[in-house]
């Protein structure tokens, strides 16, 4: 951690390694308390964030040990590839989503003109890319829907069901649906 005594909410969330709704839950359950900032930016003691990070790490370590015991009987999978850039995953997705906003500038006529200039040998490759992007966008929509439902449950004071699903779960569900 840094040498700063106080952290803003964005840095505290990043250090804790939780999503925004989980961070809000930590605040509402008073596991983390802001020292100032009733507006849009809140500040936290770095020591409090460090203590909570250690608690959360211990909780996930016990959960990981339990899941590791269950996975011990399964065959080993290839290790995940490291990202090419040193960007955080959230920043990479944000950059892609921001770039995808440019689709609003493209008309149906633009798409038709692009297609008219496409070489037929590239159809399969372009289709594959479009289907992959469609799959990712469906995944993002599903996560947004789950997040909205979870946020609504938090606003009503109910206990949320979870973080909203893992990325692999959504892809597997789509693959199963396509196999019908």
Image (cartoon, rainbow, N blue to C red):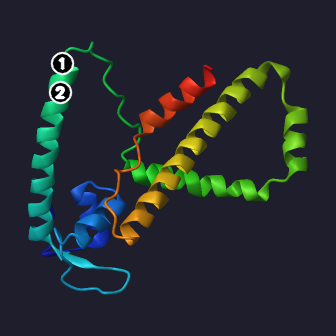
Query: x%, y% of residue 12?
Result: 24, 66
Front residue (pair 21, 4): 21
Q: Name the residue under label 1.
A: 72
**Residue found at x 17% / y 36%:** 64
For label 1, the SS is loop
Q: Looking at the picture, does residue 100 appear above or below residue 37?
A: above
Front residue (pair 51, 64): 64
**Residue found at x 86% / y 35%:** 115
Question: Quick check: can you spot residue 42?
Answer: yes
Label 2, residues with CA under 10 Å away: few <14, some 14-19, many ≥20: few
Image quarter (top left, top right, bottom left or bottom right) of the N terminus: bottom left
Query: x%, y% of residue 102?
Result: 69, 56
Question: Quick check: can you spot residue 3?
Answer: no
Q: Looking at the picture, does residue 33 appear above or below residue 154?
A: below
Q: In this view, does 35 lie to the left or right of 14?
A: left
Q: In this view, does 176 lie to the left or right of 18?
A: right
Query: x%, y% of residue 109?
Result: 91, 48
- Quarter of the image for residue 11 reads bottom left
Circle on res. 138: none
For label 2, the SS is helix
Image quarter (top left, top right, bottom left or bottom right) of the C terminus: top right
Give the Cα distance between marks 1 and 2.
Answer: 6 Å
Front residue (pair 136, 101): 136
Q: Name the residue under label 2.
A: 68
Q: Looking at the picture, does residue 115 appear above or below residue 6?
A: above
Label 1, residues with CA under 10 Å away: few <14, some 14-19, many ≥20: few
């Amino acid at each position: 951690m840094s040498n700063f005594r106080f952290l803003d909410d964005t840095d505290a969330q990043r250090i804790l390694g939780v999503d925004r709704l989980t961070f809000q839950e930590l605040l509402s359950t008073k596991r983390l308390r802001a020292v100032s900032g009733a507006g849009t930016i809140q500040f936290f003691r770095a020591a409090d964030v460090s203590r909570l990070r250690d608690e959360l790490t211990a909780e996930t370590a016990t959960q990981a040990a339990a899941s590791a015991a269950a996975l011990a009987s399964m065959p080993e999978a290839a290790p995940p590839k490291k990202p090419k850039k040193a960007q955080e995953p959230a920043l990479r997705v944000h950059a892609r989503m921001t770039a995808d906003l440019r689709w609003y500038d493209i008309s149906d006529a633009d798409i038709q003109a692009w297609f008219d200039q496409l070489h037929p040998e590239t159809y399969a490759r372009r289709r594959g890319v479009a289907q992959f992007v469609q799959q990712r966008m469906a995944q993002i929509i599903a996560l947004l829907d789950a997040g909205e439902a979870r946020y609504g449950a938090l606003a009503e004071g109910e206990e949320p069901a979870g973080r909203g699903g893992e990325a692999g779960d959504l892809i597997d569900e789509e693959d199963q649906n396509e196999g019908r």
